[in-house]
Amino acid sequence: MAGATVPTSTEAESSCATQSIFSANDSARDMILNSPLWEFWYSADGALEVVSNACETCCGYEAKHFYRNSRFMEAILIEEHLPLWHGLWRKINDGENYASAEFQIRLPDSKKRWMKFEASRALDANGCYRGIRAFCHDITSHRSVVQQLMHFTWHDSLTKLPNRCKCIKKIQKTITRAQTTGCWNFSIIYIDIDRFKNINDSLGHEAGDTILCKLADRLRDSTYGFETVFRIGGDEFVLIYEDTSDHQSVHRSIDRLIKRIKRPILWNGKQIHMSASFGIMHADMEVETAERYLQNAHVALNHGRSNCTSGVAVYDSKIFSKALKLISMELDLHNALLNDEFFLVYQPVVDTMTRAVTGFEALVRWKNSQGQIISPSKFIPLAEETGLILELGEWVLLEACSTLAAWRKSNSQFRNLKVNVNLSARQLSDLNLTDTVAQILEKTGLPPNCLRLEVTETMLMENPDYADTTLHRLRALGVGLCIDDFGTGYSSLMYLQQFPISNLKIDRSFVTDMEKNPANYEIVKAVVALAHALGLTVVAEGVEEEEQRIMLMEAGCDFSQGYLFSRPIPPEELPAMVNTMQMPQKSLPQAG
Ligand code: C2E
Ligand code: CA
Ligand code: CA
């Protein structure tokens, strides 16, 4: 039977062992022969007594082969699985009651099948060892399901790239290799596709999936052997560069990748332009876990997003302490809304010629639990990133509208004034924005034409289709729309024409050095002229000097805003401010 691995009885058992399990005309033997399962019975001394006829159905060989050649199973087993077979018999010979092994056999047509062989010692009613009973099952289809499951465990089903688990495993292996060889020449690159959420929101998930697959292909095609690419989250990928010659080679490779990613992607006849941000963590002997490499590369990525234009950042410990600060600020920000720590200040927008107040811009402030006033430029980007901006933005809208509505009721001078509220990109892509605005107007009783929403060109350019729909819906409500920071983005007035905008704010940077820089003054004049030709009114931001006001007046700029007239002030100071500014202005002291 099993040749070198013949089962033998232990000493105690041999005293009651008989040569055959079956008596001459044993009907049990016939039952086994006709069993639908592939069964083997061996006598206590190891001779094959019976093999069921089902063996032919299971492996394609008739039973006679097994009777003739006691090592026939070994002959059809694939060679590298032979140790498994021998191991099984060793266990049985060592006295274990049960042993099993999974291995492949080769069928007469050379195809391979996976089998599970289970052998157990057969004892009679007196506990005497009578031989071995074994079953052999075909487990090929089970194995293929398991293999598929394994594939799912390690691969992403959309892009077919290896996934986060596989990535962690690979990085850990890379670290271990570096520890053994002493060659710390690898880099982990974290890649996040910029504004991918916008694609999903504006074009739908199907487009999102297609674009992700195309980007995954580009990443995969760019791997030249020493890199491996993984998809570790929605729009997040990781590259592992191994055996790199120096950091420069990694950076050169990323430069190529950036170009590749930027090539337009065709979807439904449209050209979609994508970009990505990169965080790099070069090998560091002191970092021992894969998770830490990923985390650090991610920290670098976030740092790069907010601090550098190239979109590529390398991790260092300074970045880490900055990130820690941000995390604690993020937590504070969450509590700030609950604890009413936000408040609004209002900066007047005046008629450039008469200095009469025409409205206010609401600007949010945060007084944190330590009593420090934090500037919106510090926390708005964070609120954007965490999604808290939706709640905060709604609060700002409600607060600004109810403040103006209240003053309108009690003070006739407020009748024709407007309040400007800044929107963030995330709010503009929120499907509920128009409903939210409508509800707030209804709740506060503020007429829609008293509210003006400020959006930047960049926000519109990044999501033109979606912005267009939302802005038209808002305009239909009767709300005014204003382009903020004009000149810092794409500065295409012709492009902006497609949006229902009534007002344009020239960015402070043009106004600031208008007197010293004639080119800037020329730009201001040109923007005013073109805006007027398109039926828009113009506000100049950041007016600090009387000289600037005069130049703006000469350029025909309708409205101005800046420290020359007033810094942002708390709402209770508004009536006095409106009153003073409405008076004849000649001898007015300048607000600081
Ligand atoms: P912005 O919309 O361009 O607001 C004008 C900023 O310029 C304000 O800074 C204002 O205080 C400042 N400013 C006004 N006049 C002068 C001047 O004469 N000289 C100088 N040097 N600065 C002047 P602030 O309040 O720190 O706001 C910064 C930015 O934060 C705003 O820029 C706006 O983008 C954002 N922001 C403020 N409040 C909100 C809000 O409620 N929601 C959103 N989404 N963003 C807001
Ligand atoms: Ca603004
Ligand atoms: Ca502005």
Image (cartoon, helix red, strand yellow):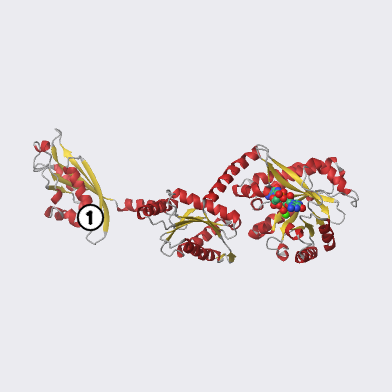
Is 175 drawn above or below residue 510 in the view shown? above
Is 268 drawn above or below residue 339 in the view shown? below
Question: Front-most of 126 and 52?
Answer: 126
**Residue 577 in view in this figure:** yes
Residue 128 as seen in the image, left or right of residue 513:
left
Question: Front-most of 511 and 316?
Answer: 316
The single residue placed furthest to the top in the displayed view is 126
| Residue at x-position 60% and y-position 44% | 330
- The residue indicated by pointer 1 is 59
Q: Residues within 10 Å of mark 1 (few under 14, many from 20)?
A: many
Query: Residue 261 in the image: x percent, y percent?
Result: 53, 63
**Residue 422 in view in this figure:** no
Query: Residue 220 in the image: x percent, y percent?
Result: 45, 62
Total of numbered circles in the picture? 1
Q: Amino acid at mark 1?
A: Cys
Residue 523 as seen in the image, left or right of residue 425:
right
| Residue at x-position 87% and y-position 44% | 412
Query: Residue 299 in the image: x percent, y percent?
Result: 53, 51
Residue 395 as seen in the image, left or right of residue 448:
left
Question: Front-most of 107 and 577?
Answer: 577
Question: Ligand 1 closer than 8 Å to the CB at disc 1?
Answer: no
Name the image quarter holding residue 492: bottom right
Question: Front-most of 92 and 531?
Answer: 531
Name the image quarter holding residue 177: bottom left
Give the structural element (helix, strand or loop) at label 1: helix
Query: Residue 79 in the image: x percent, y percent?
Result: 22, 57
Is 399 drawn above or below residue 550 in the view shown? above
